Amino acid sequence: MSLEKERYADVIVDVTQASMDRSYQYRIPPELENKIRIGCVVRIPFGNGKRSAEGYVLNIGTEPRIARDRIKPILEVPENRVTIESKLIELALWMKTTYGSSLNNALKTVLPVREKEKHAVREEVSLVWPEKKTRLLLEQYTRRHYAAKVRLLTALLKTNELEKSYVTGTLKITPESLRSLEREGVISVRSADLTRTPDDLQEPEEKEKPCILTAEQSRVCNGILREWEGANRPCLIRGVTGSGKTLVYMDLMEKVLKEGRQVILLIPEIALSWQNVKRFRSRFGNAVTILNSKMSKGERYDQFERLKKGEAQIVIGPRSALFTPFPKLGLIIIDEEQESSYRSENAPRYDARETALERARIENAHVVFGSATPSVDSVFRCREGRYAGFLLESRYGNADLPAVHVEDMREELRHGNRSILSEALREAVKERLERKEQTILFLNRRGYSGFISCRSCGEVIKCPHCDVSLTFHTNGKLVCHYCGYEISQVSRCPSCGSPYIGGFRAGTEKVEAELHRFFPEAGIIRMDADTTRKKDGYARILRSFASGEADILVGTQMIVKGHDFPRVTLVGVLAADLSLFVSDYRAAERTYQLLVQAVGRAGRGDLPGEAYIQTYHPDHYSIRAAAKQDYDAFYDEEMLAREMMHYPPACNLLAIHGSCADEQRLVVAMGHLKRYLIRNQSRDTVIIGPAPENIRKIQDIYRQVLYVKEPDEERIIRLRRLAEKFIEINSGFNRMMFQYDLNA
Ligand code: ADP
Ligand code: ZN
Ligand code: ZN
């Protein structure tokens, strides 16, 4: 026996189960000691007999979980067996350490889990006969009063293909009728495999030839290629909308594909439309496939299996597509990198950008970020030289950016205008209606009105469970957007009984109503969380607006993202301040980004555009900079603020969120935690709180937050790990939940 403590490895054999509780412990023999790392492939004795199997090391420790003499040794570490799974397990471990989650959760996030689900099949009824022949048959059936067959053929003549459940259910066609039509060869009934994505079904028409890049575009493209050959730093392309970022991405992709490597392109969920993917498919054909978050785990697993076999080389998808198990990943592109949807809200609460950098490091791949309005964090890293920065300054064809007017709403009020539209914006809308051009009006808020309050005593009507104000909907109900709690509109203040109670501020519905009053002839479409809730609601509204069915589109922030409407020549931002004063250190950044994107919606076609920004704070730097589309001016002011307040990227910020049904206990426990962290902090650490979260309770669970600011990243991660340990071993934290956000 050696004097050294023996070491054990947790080994998982079937990674598609991706779970720590499926792992087994094995002894690490001394001769394999320096070959074994987390994620590596090992051969182990398995089962009762003399069988052996390959597995992956998930963890290494010194504590045996079962009687020592029952733990078998690892047999060997196969040479040169680096699999995709090993690399993903390594990534999961990094995520666990960086974001603070269980290894189990991290593994489940990166490894697709096979689900033993019933193979979903859908049967389809389709028309085989040509239309003319079918019409003749239909006439015969009509004469003979074969009502069922008439119903079916009439329907099939309209669409060609129907789901069988619809045919037997809604159309009430009996199996006998179906069979007889099938026997005659009029129709066919076959199963469509649901695991296939829509893109498998249609080979794209013609492949598009690559565009010739402009001088500016090829300068950026070549610059990035040079960076790849050299230091291979992450590259950030800042390019105004319409400058050709997408074309640069395509040329880079082509380069990587030629080397036999694969590409992941992340785009924000909301922009993942067929329209956007089509562009890539017309260039790369069936090499392109999509992943989306609506897929079930089983579907994702099937899709991943196909990709592992090399059935496609480019994946386009949201955050989770980052874990596509490509055998030779060459490039990860993240478009609109500032989008908050790249951050996971479930543990591990990872940032897809940071995680992409780590995956690229493990697999020796490249990373490219792109945006018209990049995050302050990324630009900061460019200035520090950690990223390579590239600029696309002109729109293709030198299309002009719209003229922007800032409207001071305080002035409007002083002149007696209490409406939602300033005089100037109302005039501008009128002009567009006369010229048959389109208008987009943007309001960063959903529902009918913000909140209901009493004008006598100031009381705001709140959800009894969530400490947020209830929102008034036109169905007469007051609704809580966090938990769904709902009451009927009240006519008297619950606190003082005054009848002077009412809503403040406008929501999209109110704007719509007011527009109808101003412009009774105009066609108006509203787009917000309520009107897009149904499947395809979003696409349907965009399509109908694009086809010119309405003159004015009113909506929340979802209308400002990535869509081209050539006939839109006017954009109005109704209340720029709504996103400016929320309590979040990124409020100014978000406001700047939203305003620039909104303004960019105007004048995308041949007609020049114009934009109006209505605000109560016309002098705020993010509004002034957005009006001029001056990113650098915004960035400089914003960085000054971040440095003064020690916010990221000037400093690291760790939020420790605690929640518990007992508020008193929670406050005491968070206080303990704070004192413990203070004992372990560095000279530069600042700890703030604990304080109630913005929303103090949700569904009767109280929430408190502790903020830790620390310039050194390693030290702040160390503090988080100490906190995790402390919480784990102290009974004072029982029945409390903790979550960590680093630089979120
Ligand atoms: P971004 O992704 O930066 O918004 P796009 O790549 O979508 O920009 O380009 C905007 C529009 O200009 C597209 O319709 C694109 O086809 C066109 N375009 C840009 N660069 C070129 C080029 N070099 N040749 C031809 N068309 C171009
Ligand atoms: Zn009152
Ligand atoms: Zn609630």
Image (tube, rainbow, N blue to C red):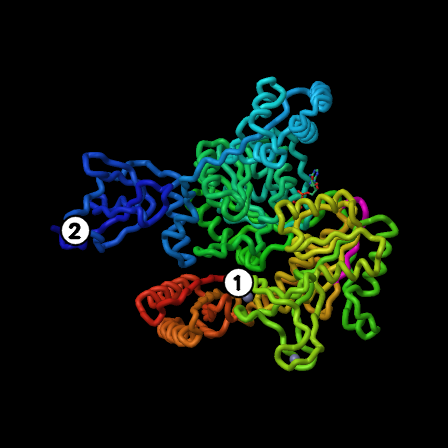
- The residue depicted at 69 percent of the width and 59 percent of the height is 595
Per the image, the residue denoted by label 1 is 649
Residue 532, x across and y down, in percent? 65, 51
Q: Position of residue 2 (x, y in %)?
A: 13, 51
Q: Position of residue 53 (x, y in %)?
A: 27, 36
- Label placed on residue 710: none
Q: Foreground residue, 612 or 468?
A: 468
Look at 43% across and 58% down and name the residue there.
99
Residue 629: x %, y % from top left: 70, 57
Tell which residue pokes out farthest to the right in this image. Answer: 434
User: Nearest the camera: 338 or 690?
Assistant: 690
- Helix, strand or loop at label 1? It is loop
Does 443 lie within the magenta span? Answer: no
Dot 2 or dot 1: first in sequence order is: 2
Left or right: residue 597 compared with residue 32:
right
| Circle 1 residues within 10 Å: few <14, some 14–19, many ≥20 | some
Residue at left offset 71%, top offset 60%: 508
Question: Which amino acid, by three-letter code, is at mark 1?
Answer: Pro
Q: Label 2 amino acid?
A: Arg
Specify the quadrant of the image occupied by residue 43: top left
**Which residue position holds label 2?**
68
Marks 2/1: CA distance? 49 Å
Whether the residues at callouts 2 and 1 have beta carbons within 8 Å, the answer is: no
State yes or no: residue 612 in magenta. yes
Placement of 168 over or under 576, stated as above or below? above
- Find the magenta span and give its range: 605-613
Q: Quadrant of residue 729?
A: bottom left
